Amino acid sequence: MLNRARKNKPSADPMAPYYTVIYAFVFICVAAVATTLFSPKQKFSEMDILDASQMLIHNGQGHQFKHGANSFFEHKTLADAKQMFMSALSDTNNLGSCKTSKGLEEGNEEMEIELPESYDWREAYPQCVQTPVNIGDRNCSSSYAFASVGAVQDKICMATNKTVQLSVQEVLDCDTNSQGCEGGYVNKVLQYGKKKGYVTAECHEYSGDKQECEVDHFESNECRLDNTIYKVNDYCIAVQEENIKRELFKNGPVVAQLQPYTDFLAYSEGSYHRTSESFKFNG
């Protein structure tokens, strides 16, 4: 009986599993490069401030404050926010210290001020508390003007026992030393009040954006024709917590600056503290 000859099977390549791994790795690398080239990531500056997924992550990390939606930053990006924060207290270091401050220069007598354990200006002068102006949702960086004029309003009420609403819009439109809705400096707004004075909001109503200042505005405005203006006598700077308290207690509200970080924009409730992944705006 003849046995049929059998062909030997070719032996398996021992490197085959490695080739499979290498091919898979190369495929993943090519896919990653293609994804980067043809579907680039969104620029950080173009990211929405109110990102639902990011707020959900933040609120699940056990922070002392919560994130939530707000109408002011709705549909705005981080680039929009940076533009809105282009404001500061002063563009100079030559502002004089408030007379209420401790450690004044030689020759200036220090005021005797005994601070209480707690103090709330709103409780001390309830008749002077006004409803905040609705500045709307327009991209107008005018907080520097609102804060400055607001402090002046409060001091006027302390002296006269009557509330008055001064025009922020005139500052935005006609103060050539400020940048309107592009931001500005508190000291420049106060200097405007010292030189030109402020008119009431009724004489120059708030519009929410910068308007053209008429050439003859200061000669034709109704309040200025009647000489119904409010001028700033002087302004100063209080440095350090103790001196700020003394100035507020003696002379009323002060203007302060908060350096904003990205994680503050979606703040909703709780005790705010800067988180490690946030960064500050250079404005």
Image: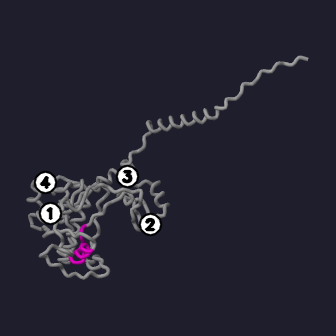
| Three-letter amino acid code at the position of disc 3 | His
- Mark 1 or 4: the one toward you: 1
Element under disc 4? loop
Q: Which numbered disc flags the more N-terminal residue, 4 or 2? A: 2
Kindly identify the residue that appears in the image at 16 percent across and 68 percent down. 96
What's the colour scheme? one colour
Q: Which residue is disc 2 drawn over?
A: 64
| Residue 173 in the image: above or below residue 226 | above
Task: State the residue in front, 256 or 232.
Answer: 256
Q: Which residue is disc 1 drawn over?
A: 191
Element under disc 3? loop
Q: Which numbered disc flags the more N-terminal residue, 1 or 4? A: 1
Q: Which residue is disc 3 drawn over?
A: 75
Q: Percent from the top left, x then y, of residue 76?
A: 36, 52
Image marks 1 and 4: residues in contact by CB distance under 8 Å? no
Task: State the residue in front, 82 or 69.
Answer: 82
Q: Percent from the top left, x then y, of residue 175?
A: 16, 57
| Three-letter amino acid code at the position of disc 4 | Glu
- Mark 4 or 2: the one toward you: 2
Q: Which residue is disc 4 drawn over?
A: 214
Q: CA distance from mark 2 to mark 3?
A: 26 Å
Element under disc 1? helix
| Three-letter amino acid code at the position of disc 2 | Gln
* Residue located farthest toward the top when viewing the structure as drawn: 2
Q: CA distance from mark 4 to mark 2?
A: 50 Å
Kindly identify the residue that appears in the image at 67 percent across and 32 percent down. 14
Q: Could you classify mark 1 by the number of other residues whose Cα lies within 10 Å: few (under 14), some (14-19), or many (20 or more)?
A: some
Q: Could you classify mark 2 by the number of other residues whose Cα lies within 10 Å: few (under 14), some (14-19), or many (20 or more)?
A: few
Write the start and end of the magenta stretch as one range.
242-255
Dominant secondary-structure state across the stretch colored magenta: helix
Residue 230 seen in the figure: no
